[in-house]
Image (cartoon, grey):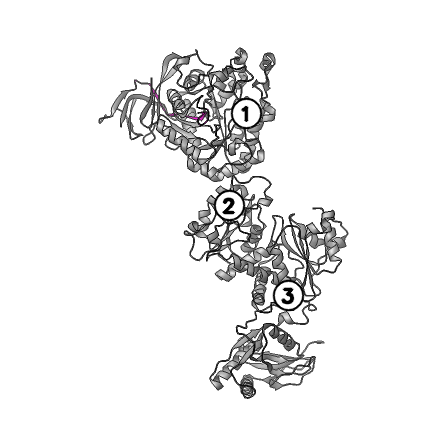
Amino acid sequence: MNWTKHDLIDLQSLSKEEIELILETAKSLREVSTRDIKKVPALRGKTVAMLFFEPSTRTRTSFELAAKRLSADTLNISPGGSSFSKGESILDTAKNIQAMNVDMIVVRHSSAGTPKILADALEPAIINAGDGCREHPTQALLDMFTIKEKLGKIEGMKVGIVGDILHSRVARSNIWGLTKLGARVTLCGPSTLMPMDIKKTGVQITYDVEDVVRDSDVIMLLRLQNERMTEKFLPSVREFAKKFGINKDRLKRAKKDVIIMHPGPTNRGVEISGDVADGEQSVILEQVTNGIAIRMAVLYLLLGAKDRERKPTTKQKGTKHVLTT
Amino acid sequence: MSLLLKSAIIVNADKISDKPQDIFIENGKISKIGTSLQAHGARVMDVKKNLVFPGLIDMHCHLREPGREDKETIETGSRSAAKGGFTTICCMPNTTPVIDHGMIVEGMIKEAKRVGLVNVFPMGAITRGQKGEELVDMFELKEAGCVALSDDGKSVYNAQLMRLAMAYAQMVGILLIEHCEDPPLSSHGVMNESYSSTVLGLKPQAGVAETVIVSRDIELANYLKARVHMAHMSLKRSVELIRFAKSQGIQVTAEACPHHFTLTEEDVQSFDTNTKVNPPLRSREDVEAIKEGLRDGTIDCISTDHAPHTHEEKELEFDRAPFGMIGFETAVGLTLNELVDKKVLTLLQMAEKMSAAPARILGLKTKGAVNESFDADLTIIDPDKEWTLKKEEIASKSKNSPFIGRKFKGKVEMTICGGKISYES
Amino acid sequence: MTNPASKIMDQDIVRRALMRIAHEILENGSGIEELCLIGIRTRGAVLAERLKGCILQIEKKTVPVGILDITLYRDDLSTISTKPILHETLIDFDITGKDIVLVDDVLYTGRTIRSALDALVDFGRPSKIQLAVLIDRGHRELPIRADYVGKNIPTSVHQNVQVRLKETDGVDDEVVIEDRAGPS
């Protein structure tokens, strides 16, 4: 099949075949990073702008390296050092970037829906690097890629996602992606951090982490998103770590070939103990390596062809977006 | 050590013996109920056709230890409770320090075992220090032995925090008990807002301070499909709200205290600080509604809110005295005289309200009934014995009761807890 | 009116051509020690495997074979409208100092080979790179030539040279010239 989408906003709107195409493409691109000369000329002359309104080291550098290894030029814009802090709206900032003939904008923002608004208004291809609590598509794609590499397939695999589900965009993207590809997803976390009606997405819920430990082929751990918690959802980190944390002792009751995943950064001693994070069941570092291959695949598929499928942008239809953050 | 009680009229919530029964107790359990049982070396006691209730359970009391051992201790409180016929008491966590940590719970249970008179189940706080800001480690408190959690003394004022508490407690599997009082609305009032408060010139507490929290928690329980227990209901309107909630299948339970079905705001006229309670004594209409609520099942159980205070503290001016009265030793008498004798409740319903219902609400599966294999917790009552409450005979360390000098008909003759006699008159 | 397709090679001719190319590779050059074959996806890779088999038959020695996907090095990536599907490149030996023979099915404009040379340079520094093709159909657009050719076939730009191999197409080997429908 061929890739026809102009932007990558979320996994909720992708089909199973589109997701599989990205995973296949990533597989072929992975070896580029193992060469002595880690570069191919595929996106030579393309410009990719990183517009990160939330702090990020690993996602931003991952996208940068992916772009550079495909020979594209990169541009970094973060709100602190830009005119944004002088009161410019996000749409104005983006339009200014567009005026410099940039081919793609990779955007991360604390407000859900921002990438979609940019995609509707602008010409460059938009990749969502995380919007609020809504989605983080490339993270879930690299998670699925890692599962497929380690376990051979995704269909029928039992995946347990443990932690602060309520505030996690990684959890949501993984839920969409994994269920589309036929995995069986179980969410586990304190009841106060479980979103309303999440079962309607086709997942199971348990409040007992032992259930997840016992049955899962993959255990995916999430960090407590303290920066998104305006209220005290939990009594204490102490009780959370005791009741939901994954440590060597708990893993004694896990399947022999279980893999432990984490999008990072890890809080050792909270959701995951140090020895598990560094242990042989952990694939956390492989996730990072695969992240570059996935992002290269996404850049490759979205950029390049001259006449990409265009949807009518709202600016063409004459509506105005006044966006302030 | 075994015990054989002969000639007992057993009053369970579902059945009263039509003829006298014998009860054989062994290893802390009721091992056999029947007629003409053999002693087999057990100590034999003739109950003389007195009523034998399943051990009474008080879901709401204050033992003041740790911190205010001058008012009451676990030991003196246990003695008072046993004298009042209680075999299980659940004490509130508003002590110093607040019961918000597993180790405090364990310490109290240990002390209660040492005293060995009644079962003491400490209740933990809902928020750390009862400050209303963060939740306690509920798993830890449950594992340490708490049967329920409450911020009693006040409500959890922040509605979002109460929502989170209910959702978390539901996951943990522990009951939350709400003291329903909206602080700005109650505005430190010392008696019910009414014609009486106007005439007496005392700072009034609006009834709506109770009902808004009752409504709020009913809504939260409905939204989350969680459960909540309302402490010391005192108003007709509260009863109506709970009745409606139950008809909708919302998981709410409620309790009422003897003083709220016995005394009214008019009893405050004497300025006796022993009539200063929170929630305050209400109108005659409210008292009748509480009784009706008990009769029709809207109010599930009776608890005492036993609240000891020292003589010095209660001897202050009405505005400055602390709220509360002791209640262990008058609960049975008041229930018999105000409810059973006045045909509001039957004896079976009294067993329900004072034993079976609290056992069910707290999940105490081997208590609340006089049945074989249940715990040998029994309360033996002589329904005809007349007596007067005398200050010097009160077993509690504190004597703050407005019923001193009152005549009662019906007295606790013996209390047996875990097969051991913890009180004998 | 279009001409019917004409078959110019069948499986026997293909077999003999490959065997001859194998002999030529072995005669020509500095020996078998540093020899490596790298086939260009997809059919070039198949032919490289076959050449390895021929060399094994002749010299009783195994020569390393790699597979190269040149998609990322195409010079028309930004102008084509549909993205070509990317396949893995698999070269698991060091090419520095080696005598590489690139293998492809058809040599036409020479752009594929230019991409392949660009790719190889990113993998290391071979001692020598030569080119073996099954068919040379002329019409070079770049200064590229093959060292070993199975068959030279003069064609017009309005024609299509179709190579079909058992491993990739499921039929007996054949090389067919078809008329292109419409302008090329």
Mark 3: secondary structure: loop
* Crowding at mark 3 (Cα within 10 Å: few <14, some 14-19, many 20+): many
Question: What residue sits right under mark 2 in the picture?
Answer: A189
Rendered position, A188 above or below B309: below
Q: Quadrant of the C terminus of chain B?
A: top left
Q: Which residue is mark 3?
A: A70
CA separation in Å, label 2 and label 1 = 35 Å
Q: State which quarter of the image contains the N terminus of chain B.
A: top left
Q: Give the numbered dot on residue B185.
A: none
Residue A194 appears in the rendering? yes
Q: Residue A243, how many percent across, how many down? A: 46, 44
User: Identity of the amino acid at label 2?
Assistant: Gly
- Relative to residue B23, is residue C104 depicted above or below? below
**Label 3 vs 2, first from the N-terminus:** 3
> Who is closer to the viewer here, B408 or C63?
C63
Residue B64 in magenta stretch: yes
- Chain at numbered mark 1: B
Q: Is residue A322 visible?
A: no
In the image, which disc is placed on residue B238?
1
How far across and down, in percent of the image, does residue B269 sit?
54, 11
Residue A220 in magenta stretch: no
Determine whether label 1 and label 3 are within 8 Å by CB. Answer: no
**Left of C140 or right of it: where is B365?**
left
What chain letter is assigned to the residue under label 3?
Answer: A
Position of residue B297 measured from the top left corner of the image (x, y, whole percent): 47, 26
Residue range (magenta): B48-68
- Dot 2 lies on which element? loop
Give me the C-alpha separation between circle 3 and circle 2: 40 Å
